[in-house]
Amino acid sequence: MFIRNLGLPCLLAAGLATFTTASLAEPLPTRDQAAQALAASYNQQQRQFMLESVNATASAQGDLVHYHLTLAEQGSSAKGIELLAQQVRADICKVDQQSLYRGVRVKLVISGSNGDSLYQAIQSDNDCSRLPY
């Protein structure tokens, strides 16, 4: 009888502790918050590109990260720009594989020093191949 009486208060205390712990846990970030975090990480990193004279900036709008690269040199070839875009897309895929950034889209824009748009694409984690879980 004593054990049965002791069991109910212990059960109530355990249930209350579980509820309190669950309510104090941090919620998962939204896609908008993940996009802001991704843009901030792009801005903090010093990326090494094949073309050394590249200015890179990133900003977030909703769940879309705008990643803008501006080439300092005017005479970049179409092949060089495509190689740069491939390198950046591969870098984006490496980051998109992290579960925090799933569902965040990245709009990559490469512009010349005169402001002309040389390359533009929107990429999501669905565009990246990944190992099955």
Image (tube, helix red, strand yellow):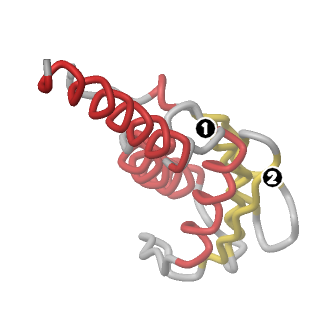
Q: From the viewer's perspective, is 26 left or right of 87?
A: right
Report the residue at 22% width, 25% height from top.
7
Q: Are marks 2 and 1 in contact (CB under 8 Å)?
A: no
Report the residue at 48% width, 23% height from top.
126
Q: Earlier in the sequence, mark 2 or mark 1?
A: 1
Disc 2 is placed on an element classified as strand
Disc 1 is placed on an element classified as loop
Q: Check disc 1 and give the amino acid type.
A: Val
Q: Nearer the viewer, residue 32 or 96?
A: 32
Report the residue at 49% width, 81% height from top.
46
Report the residue at 12% width, 25% height from top.
3
Give the class, few, some or many, for how many residues have Cα within 10 Å of label 2's Cα (few <14, many ≥20): few
Give the class, few, some or many, for how many residues have Cα within 10 Å of label 1's Cα (few <14, many ≥20): many
Q: Which residue is mark 2?
A: 117
Q: From the viewer's perspective, is 1 left or right of 105?
A: left
Q: Check disc 2 and give the amino acid type.
A: Ser
Q: Residue 49, located in which quarter of the rendered image? A: bottom left
| Label 2 vs label 1, nearer the camera | 1
Q: Considering the image in quadrants, where does the C terminus appear?
A: top left
Residue 75 vertical position relative to residue 116 in the rendered view, above or below: below
Residue 125: percent from left, percent from top? 48, 31
Distance CA(mark 2)–CA(mark 1): 23 Å
Q: Residue 97, located in which quarter of the rendered image? A: top left
Residue 102: percent from left, percent from top? 50, 35
Q: Residue 72, located in which quarter of the rendered image? A: bottom right
Residue 95: percent from left, percent from top? 42, 50
Residue 6 vertical position relative to residue 113 in the rendered view, above or below: above
Q: Considering the image in quadrants, where does the N terminus appear?
A: top left
Residue 127: percent from left, percent from top? 47, 26
Q: From the viewer's perspective, is 9 left or right of 65?
A: left
Q: Which residue is mark 1?
A: 104
